[in-house]
Amino acid sequence: QVQLVQSGGGLVQSGGSLRLSCAASGMIFRVNDMGWYRQAPGNQREFVASITAGGRTKYADFVNDRFTISRHNGKNAVYLELNSLESEDTAIYYCKADVVSHWAGPDSAYWGQGTQVTVSS
């Protein structure tokens, strides 16, 4: 079994910054891609950013160089630095990790519990 535990988030004024963290633990042989998604009220969950084990990153268009994803492979952790936040960024943010639990096995997707980010205008 694998668990993803998130921390960070909270309430911030428009233009402010926050940092989200997520760490995976449990039966882990290797962590492949890690990423962040978000879901605003009434909307579907959407992709925010992802990072491969080798550090290659991908961002949603709406990020516009405001967010930075990073990871610490030794800690099986992924981070999301949120800058220049806007009210439209208000959502629950979820981390995701593609985890291989056995050396010969496929990877499976695991999700964090979600953390609220609220941006006041």
Image: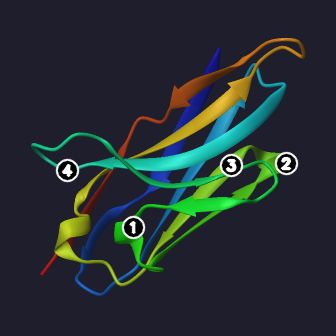
Q: Earlier in the sequence, mark 2 or mark 4?
A: 4
Q: Which residue is mark 3?
A: 77
Q: Amino acid at mark 1?
A: Asp
Q: Earlier in the sequence, mark 4 or mark 3?
A: 4
Look at discs 2 and 1 and give the one toward the viewer: 1
Q: Amino acid at mark 2?
A: Gly
Percent position (x, y) of residue 108?
A: 63, 20
Residue at point 82%, 31% (across, down): 30
Q: Are marks 3 and 1 in contact (CB under 8 Å)?
A: no
Provide the secondary structure element on which disc 2 rests.
helix
Look at discs 2 and 4 and give the one toward the viewer: 4
Q: Which residue is mark 2?
A: 74
Q: Earlier in the sequence, mark 1 or mark 4?
A: 4
Q: Residue furthest front?
A: 61
Provide the secondary structure element on which disc 3 rests.
strand
Q: Which residue is mark 1?
A: 61
Percent position (x, y) of residue 90?
A: 22, 62
Q: Which residue is mark 4?
A: 40
Look at discs 3 and 1 and give the one toward the viewer: 1
Q: How many other residues sit within 10 Å of disc 1, few (<14), some (14-19) or many (≥20)? A: few
Q: How many other residues sit within 10 Å of disc 3, few (<14), some (14-19) or many (≥20)? A: many
Provide the secondary structure element on which disc 1 rests.
helix
Look at discs 1 and 4 and give the one toward the viewer: 1
Residue at mark 4 to residue at mark 3: CA–CA distance: 24 Å
Q: How many other residues sit within 10 Å of disc 4, few (<14), some (14-19) or many (≥20)? A: some
Q: Amino acid at mark 3?
A: Ala
Query: In the rendered view, how is the structure colored?
Result: rainbow
| Quadrant showing the N terminus | top right
Q: How many marks?
A: 4
Percent position (x, y) of residue 14?
A: 23, 83
Residue 100 lies left or right of residue 21; in this view the side is right
